[in-house]
């Protein structure tokens, strides 16, 4: 059997070639994967935590009926989880698990 000179998709052919789980080199354009920018990760973390702030504040106020306590817990929770989410996003940005590689060519 001769091998075709046209590149094929490893997933379709059943080849076991897989990208490494952690990618150190993932350029924004022209490479195998596209990574999110730091600004995008920050905006995602902020919008997610603003939503979470509303839920945390509401839950605390419903339980305690104290605005000062609800606000304090909500703000503390906002900043702690904002940093945690940002770090989580940046780590996952380096993981190739579940990502589909771009073809090395386009027709």
Image (cartoon, rainbow, N blue to C red):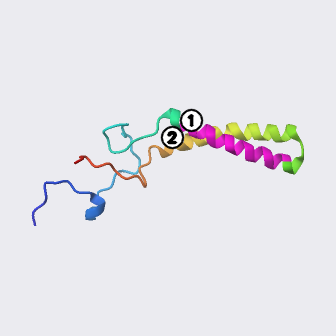
Magenta part of the chain: 41-61
Residue at left offset 31%, top offset 61% = 11
**Looking at this rendering, what residue extends furthest in the right direction?**
65
Residue at left offset 20%, top offset 54% = 7
Disc 2 element: helix
Residue 55 falls left or right of residue 46: right
Residue 15, how many percent across, how many down?
A: 26, 62
Residue 101 falls left or right of residue 49: left
**Looking at this rendering, what residue extends furthest in the top direction?**
39
| Residue at image mark 1 | 42
Give the vertical position of 2 relative to 42 (above or below): below
Residue 61 falls left or right of residue 25: right
Quadrant (top left/top right/bottom left/bottom right) for the N terminus:
bottom left
- Residue placed most toward the observer, 50 or 33: 50
Give the vertical position of 18 relative to 75 (above or below): below
2 vs 1, front mark: 1
| Residue at image mark 2 | 90
The disc, 2 or 1, on the residue closer to the chain's N-terminal end is: 1
Residue 30, how many percent across, how many down?
A: 30, 39
């Amino acid at each position: 059997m001769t091998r075709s000179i046209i590149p094929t998709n490893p997933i379709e052919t059943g080849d076991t070639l897989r990208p490494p789980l952690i990618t150190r080199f993932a350029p924004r354009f022209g490479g195998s994967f596209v990574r999110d920018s730091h600004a995008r990760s920050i905006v995602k973390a902020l919008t997610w935590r603003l939503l979470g702030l509303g839920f945390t504040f509401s839950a605390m106020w419903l339980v305690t009926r104290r605005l000062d306590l609800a606000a304090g817990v909500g703000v503390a929770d906002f900043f702690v989880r904002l940093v945690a989410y940002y770090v989580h996003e940046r780590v996952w940005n380096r993981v190739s698990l579940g990502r589909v590689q771009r073809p090395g060519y386009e027709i």
